[in-house]
Image (cartoon, rainbow, N blue to C red):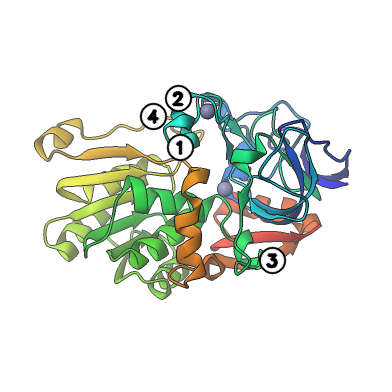
Amino acid sequence: MKAVMLEEFQEPLEVQDVERPEPEPHGIVAEVDGCGVCRSDWHCWQGDWDWFGYRPDPPHILGHEPCGTVVEVGEDVESVAEGDHIAIPFNFACGKCELCRNGRENICENHIGLGFMNEAPGAFAEEVHVPNADINAVPLPDEIDPDTAAGIGCRFMTSYHGMAHRGDVGNGEDVVVHGLGGVGLSAVHIADALGANVIGVDLFEEKLEKAEQLGAVTTVNASEVDDPAKEVHDITDGGADCSVDALGIATTCQNAVNSLAKGGRHVQIGLTTAEEEGHVSLPTDEFVAKEIDFRGSLGLQPSRYPEMLDMIRTGKIDPKELVSETVGIEEVPDRLAAMSDYDTMGIPVCNEF
Ligand SMILES: [Zn+2]
Ligand SMILES: [Zn+2]
């Protein structure tokens, strides 16, 4: 089958012919219907995420935002059948550890990152293996078509968890989202649907316009002001209730935290880059004086997909709004290369293999 292979970090990616996966007893194999092209693929390709354990030994298949149709089922799988349409989270859970048993399977002790770790070859491929499929293969309702499901990827579902659970936003609160890539725009759309007043911050005018289309009440172009955080304080008359760093560079993280009002909460969704290597300097005393919460947010636990899928099914949120273009597998290497210049909008999806 065709697959996008990482042969050497930072060297051009190739589409190659590789072996199809076989299901492990607890796993399934799905034919990939769609797979989002994400900045996280780009970071993995650059070899950025050594400190996070997301640096596979090449050769490795990239891709971590798939939805698919089950084509083969391992003998120990109980709840998944051939022909099922499924969403596939990138952060595979074991289903057995204490976190899994307490509904926090997105941060499972035995976490395996699809497309990021040796144990899980990725989904820029005709077929992908899903381990522990009774947990990690999330059934899709019939009303959600493959094009919509393909937009759920990691960015949309990650933003859902960040806004609905970790940020707990709503009730007319002011939420500021710094960095309007796929995660940031999804966060704007979802926070708006949850009842927040959303402010989007980015350097690019077209991303700010898209944020307003998706429900932002106003935006700040960070390239045109001295201090974006001060702008947010002026707009909100005292600071945001919740801030989001959806990019993961020092500047957006610091600006997001500095945008907060007293008692505010910061949601960190973006992982940092090779520049920060996981460390950003933050105004610690402000956390004390203002009683600010700093909350990390990783993926979305499979057990909580149904609430997001319900909101999609009833039209309150729509992942398709974020899908900027669809491409064939041959174009994936170029789409990822374009991310070196931040030259992408929303969520490109690969849906031809
Ligand atoms: Zn677990
Ligand atoms: Zn992603």
Distance CA(mark 1)–CA(mark 3)? 27 Å
Q: Residue at x 49, y 55 (%)?
A: 306
Amino acid residing under circle 4: His
What secondary structure is marked by label 4?
loop
Amino acid residing under circle 1: Thr
Q: Residue at x 52, y 52 (%)?
A: 155
> CB of mark 2 within 8 Å of CB of mark 1?
no
User: Mark 1 or mark 3, which is nearer to you?
Assistant: 3
What secondary structure is marked by label 3?
strand
What secondary structure is marked by label 2?
helix
Residue neighbourhood size for the residue with mark 1, other residues' Cα within 10 Å, grouped as few (<14), some (14–19), many (≥20):
many
> CB of mark 3 within 8 Å of CB of mark 4?
no
> CB of mark 4 within 8 Å of CB of mark 1?
yes
Q: Residue furthest left?
A: 289
Instruction: State whether residue 63 appears in this view.
Output: yes
Q: From the viewer's perspective, is residue 24 above or below residue 65? A: above
List the residue tagged with mark 2.
Answer: 98
Distance CA(mark 2)–CA(mark 4)? 28 Å
Q: Residue 44 or 163: which is nearer the viewer?
A: 163
Disc number at residue 326?
A: 3
What secondary structure is marked by label 1?
loop
